[in-house]
Amino acid sequence: MPSDKLTELGIRKSKSGKKEQKLYDGQGLYLLIHPNGSKYWRVKYRFLGKEKVLALGVWSNVSLTDARTMRNEAKIILKSGQDPNLVKQNILINKQVDQLNTFKAVAEEWLLMKEKEWKQNNFQDVKRAIENHLYPDLGHRPLSEITSAELLSVLKKIEGQGKYEATSRARQKCEAIFRYANLSQRCENNPASNLKGTLISPKKKKFNALNPEELPEFLIKLNEYDGSIITKLALRLVLYTLARTAEIRFATWNEFDLESSEPLWRVPKERMKMGLEHHVPLSSQALGVINQVRKYSEGNHYVFHQINNPNKPMSENTMLYAIYRMGYRSRATVHGFRATMSTLLNENEHNPDVIERLLSHQEQNKVRDSYNRAEYLPQRRKILQWLGDYLDSIDDTRDKKDIIKKNTQLNILEVGKS
């Protein structure tokens, strides 16, 4: 059968009539000319014994060369046993799905799910970071079309601003969003998963922390601190329990079982960094702190409340500013005391696994972690009692003024050497 009979010049000069006209190119391809002058490409073919027509587009949006290429592609589809019209419909459907499943659309679905799982502050931080760093370049893009190279270029823009931590977190969030899209059948690739090692690693944030040898002097200054007694007691409880600042600040009386022979503080999962309930055995010293603070806040909701407003928890920086007033600015933080106590316990050869549970660090095996909130509870109680006794020993049996004087002299000597 003769083919390639049409030319672009002939098509351009062709005129419309009162009825539809067909200009045949060959192998089923023809140009359909409507009375209004519009010209449409069509391919006639047979599938399963039935004659069908495949629409290829409008001339001159689709050139003669393009139409012939599309005709040949349709014939290849026919040889594979498929109907070109059904294949075309599936392609159009997939394109429509892609346009609906943009990075922003899927990311907002993922965020909606995470909002129910995360603490509100953390959720808002993540949402804000995605909106600021990822939506401007990726928000409108169909998820299935985003490549590793494209994603890397976006992340490199953040990195170029010196925001290494933000870049690392953005890559992690992209990986999670694409993983969600994979599971919900929105795309098959995860372009973020193979970008590890292509970005500058952020420096791990270290909290200023005292050495265990500096604890006697700190206890002296804590005893002599002339600020709020509630603040002093809160800092004491940090030392005795290794709890985080927020866990102390938002502690409520109903979390404490003080009448038991084995007193316990149950920190609810909503206040824990890892979202799992944490059990804190109370040493005799910790129990003493709680009984002492009762004099000032029993009957109120929060154990450690604001001085001027007992209905609100202690302010976020109250304990930190107290440490600063004691002379430890740039030397210690409240969170840093967890590191100090961890060092002390490890140096005294306590079980590292038990210490990790004391610090409420997340178990790598999440299934296991879901039921081990009380794991090592007897051992943890024993270690915390050892810690309380140790702090008592360095707090009570030393000449505190001599220690301060000795350390001051050492500092003078060090300055003299420099």
Image (cartoon, rainbow, N blue to C red):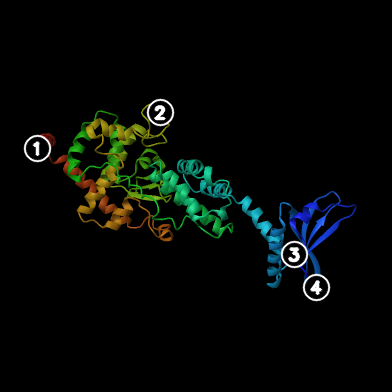
What residue is pinned by disc 2?
309
Q: Mark 2 or 3 closer to N-term?
A: 3
* Spatial CA span between label 2 and label 1: 50 Å
Left or right: 406 as drawn, with respect to 132: left
Quadrant containing the C terminus in the rendered view: top left
Q: Residues within 10 Å of mark 1 (few under 14, many from 20)?
A: few
Quick one: SS at disc 4?
Answer: loop
The reply to whether callout 4 and callout 3 are in contact (CB within 8 Å) is no
Three-letter code for the amino acid on which mark 4 is drawn: Gly
Q: Is residue 268 visible?
A: no
* Spatial CA span between label 2 and label 3: 89 Å
Three-letter code for the amino acid on which mark 3 is drawn: Asp
Q: Quadrant of residue 301?
A: top left
Of 339 and 239, nearer the camera is: 339
Q: Residues within 10 Å of mark 4 (few under 14, many from 20)?
A: few
* Spatial CA span between label 3 and label 1: 95 Å
Three-letter code for the amino acid on which mark 1 is drawn: Lys
Q: What residue is at 30 percent from the left and 41 percent from the top?
A: 237
Q: Is residue 313 visible?
A: yes
* Spatial CA span between label 2 and label 4: 85 Å
Residue 376 x %, y %? 32, 57
Three-letter code for the amino acid on which mark 2 is drawn: Asn
What residue is pinned by disc 3?
4
Looking at the image, the residue that sits furthest to the right is 18
What residue is pinned by disc 4?
49
* Spatial CA span between label 4 and label 3: 26 Å
Quick one: SS at disc 3?
Answer: loop
Q: Mark 4 or 3 closer to N-term?
A: 3
Left or right: 263 as drawn, with respect to 170: left
Q: Residues within 10 Å of mark 3 (few under 14, many from 20)?
A: few
What residue is pinned by disc 1?
417
